Image (cartoon, helix red, strand yellow):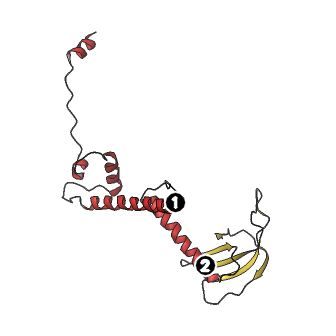
């Protein structure tokens, strides 16, 4: 199942019955054109089905599927569920910073997502645990994440990480360094 662009034609169409009052506006069978653009041939030459649906926000979508037997409402509901899955993965990529999955097995993906959720929740807990006294401003969670990444192997409380350390005093030059500088 995929979405069709608004200008993609459907050839040799046969209209199908649409129940009134639903979110399905039209249902028809037909063929995609031989060429989808001037540079691209159509890889799908069999009969397909176009279902025009109005979604919750009023936008009209054209769905195309090779499922010629299922009811149009069921196909629209499957597309909506599929879209929710896509939005979930988009949220994971943006908020949990998962660029790609390390492995492709179901178990490996579950573990990677679980670890990312745990890290995200620990970061939120650490952010919420920061004292909100008058003079110290709590940094945003994104800044706190950067601080934790930078000091990952340092064993200090997070409030100490938020306060910059004083620079180390510079030691006076030793006798060998003094001789080199004199020349």
96 relative to 1, above or below: above
Nearest to the observer: residue 69 or residue 103: 103
Q: Quadrant of the C terminus?
A: top left
Q: Under tag 2, what secondary structure? A: helix
For the point 24% across and 12% down, the residue is 179
Q: Position of residue 36 (x, y in %)?
A: 75, 63
Quarter holding residue 64: bottom right
For the point 71% across and 87% down, the residue is 17
For the point 28% across and 62% down, the residue is 125
Assess disc 2: are there few (<14), some (14-19) or many (≥20) residues with their C-alpha within 10 Å of its C-alpha: many
Q: Position of residue 124 (x, y in %)?
A: 31, 61
Nearest to the observer: residue 53 or residue 133: 53
For the point 25% across and 48% down, the residue is 161
Q: Is residue 93 left or right of residue 70?
A: left
Quarter holding residue 59: bottom right
Residue 93, labelled with which disc?
Answer: none
Q: Inspect this view and state whether residue 8 appears.
A: yes
- Labels 2, 1: front one: 1
Residue extending farthest bottom: 20
From the image, tell me which residue sits under label 2.
76
Residue 105, labelled with which disc?
Answer: 1
Q: Position of residue 78 (x, y in %)?
A: 58, 76
Q: Under tag 1, what secondary structure? A: loop
Q: Are marks 2 and 1 in contact (CB under 8 Å)?
A: no
Is tag 2's residue or tag 1's residue first in the polypeptide sequence? 2
Q: CA distance from mark 2 to mark 1?
A: 29 Å
Nearest to the observer: residue 101 or residue 121: 101
Assess disc 1: are there few (<14), some (14-19) or many (≥20) residues with their C-alpha within 10 Å of its C-alpha: few
171 relative to 149, above or below: above
Nearest to the observer: residue 40 or residue 7: 40
97 relative to 19, above or below: above
């Amino acid at each position: 199942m995929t979405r069709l662009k608004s200008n993609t034609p459907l050839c040799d169409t046969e209209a199908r019955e649409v129940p009134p009052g639903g979110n399905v506006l039209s249902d028809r069978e037909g063929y995609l054109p031989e060429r989808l653009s001037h540079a691209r041939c159509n890889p799908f030459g069999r009969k397909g089905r176009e279902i025009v649906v109005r979604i919750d926000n009023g936008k009209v979508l054209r769905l195309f599927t090779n499922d010629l037997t299922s009811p149009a409402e069921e196909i629209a509901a499957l597309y909506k569920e599929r879209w929710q899955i896509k939005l979930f993965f988009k949220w994971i990529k943006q908020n949990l910073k998962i660029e790609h999955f390390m492995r492709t097995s179901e178990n490996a993906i579950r573990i990677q997502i679980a670890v990312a959720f745990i890290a995200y929740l620990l970061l939120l807990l650490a952010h919420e645990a920061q004292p909100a006294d008058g003079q110290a401003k709590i940094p945003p969670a994104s800044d706190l994440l950067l601080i934790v990444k930078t000091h990952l192997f340092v064993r200090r409380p997070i409030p100490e990480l938020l306060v910059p350390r004083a620079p180390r005093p510079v030691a006076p030059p030793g006798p060998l360094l003094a001789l080199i500088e004199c020349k």
